[in-house]
Amino acid sequence: MAATLHDVANLAGVSFKTVSNVVNGYPHVRPATREKVERAIAELGYKPNLSARSLRSGRTGAIALAVPELNLSYFAELAGFVIEAAERAGLVTLVEQTGGDRAREIALLQSPRLRRTDGLILSPLGMRQEDAGALDVAFPLVLLGERTFDWPSDHVTMDNLRAARAATEYLLASGRRRIAVIGENEDEVMGSARLRLRGYREALEAGGVEYDERLVARATLWHRADGARAMRELLDRGVAFDAVFGFNDTLALGAMRVLQEAGLRVPEDVAVLGFDNLDEAAYAIPSLTTVDPGREWIARTAVETLLERLRRGGGEAPPSTKLADFTIVARESAPGA
């Protein structure tokens, strides 16, 4: 016979209610207790009866996650962490890919497909402030990223500005003074590129280093090919630089390949620093120094926020904004001072 919640409670030595809280993602459970329950669930092979839960609660046992594109490693890894966090709460995750397209993001918010889920975690990229009314939905919604809207929605994000400033300060402290950046997007009104460029400029100003537009390379998309293309443009300009700050790891990795092809040594001639702390960054040659923006925390907190909204019955509580902490992960491509 299939294991039950009572079986899990007996094996873990806790109450039925405690097991229910863990399965349903209740955040206020002591880590040691949660670990005992999760071990018991794994040992017994307990699987929540989603159909029975749906009949009792009116819920589907599923949530939706919508990201711009899974080809970008950041969003692929974020999706993995969201799926893991949802599984611990006994939920399945349906993943949507919007392409960062404004019309597709708005259409998704109105899609009947979401009726098969209990709520949505959305990372909007194309939507604008004038589209904020589209966020007036009948289901719990958690926004990710820096696309802030004047609308009462729960929001979980990273500290792009302070993290970019800290990354630039790290390079300055290691003795670099001609720091190029890759990832600027002049078409962007609000978002990660704009905030990271601002953090970079603030660090230069505080360090007494003059801002030089010739050191800023545009990249509308943030794939490896875009980082490589931007680096070739920087080299073609003939402007001297001794460090590169890629606005994400994939840009930095593409740029680092071109530097090496050009016969420049990393980090001896040019230090390289990225942003995201992707798994592959640790295995690049040389390994990539990067900003860890708290991706796993963001994923876990987004799921917990959505579940808390479900438990409260939707809009009873005021919307929350939660900001992840960040760290600089020093590796071979840009060793510290």
Image: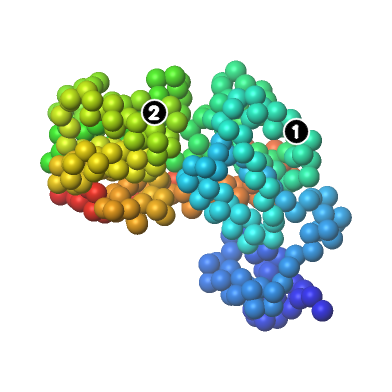
Q: Give, as a three-letter code, the residue at label 2.
A: Ala
Residue 140: tell me if it is visible: yes
Is 20 left, or right, of 126 in this rendering?
right
Residue 174: tell me if it is visible: no
Q: Give, as a three-letter code, the residue at label 1.
A: Ser
Of badges 2 and 1, nearer the viewer stands 2
Circle 2 Cα neighbour tier, 10 Å, few/some/many (<14 / 14–19 / ≥20): many
Q: Which residue is mark 2?
A: 219
The correct choice, above or below, for 128 with respect to 260 in the image is above
Q: Residue at x 39, y 33 (%)?
A: 226
Q: Nearer the viewer, residue 18 or 275?
A: 275
The correct choice, above or below, for 105 with respect to 93 in the image is above
Q: Residue at x 18, y 45 (%)?
A: 265
Tell me the quarter of the image containing the N terminus.
bottom right
**Going by the picture, which residue comes out furthest to the left?**
175
Counting residues from the start of the chain, the first of labels 2 and 1 encountered is: 1
Q: Residue at x 50, y 36 (%)?
A: 145
The correct choice, above or below, for 259 with respect to 88 in the image is above
Could you say which disc has been placed on residue 111 in the image? 1
Q: Nearer the viewer, residue 263 or 21?
A: 263
Q: Residue 161: percent from the left, percent from the top?
A: 36, 34
Q: Residue 223: percent from the left, percent from the top?
A: 43, 37
Q: CA distance from mark 2 to mark 1?
A: 32 Å
Q: In which image quadrant can residue 271 be found?
A: top left
Q: Residue at x 73, y 46 (%)?
A: 118
Is 12 left, or right, of 195 in this rendering?
right
Is 10 left, or right, of 243 in this rendering?
right
Q: Secondary structure at mark 1?
A: loop
Is 150 left, or right, of 270 in this rendering?
right
Q: In which image quadrant can residue 90 be found?
A: bottom right
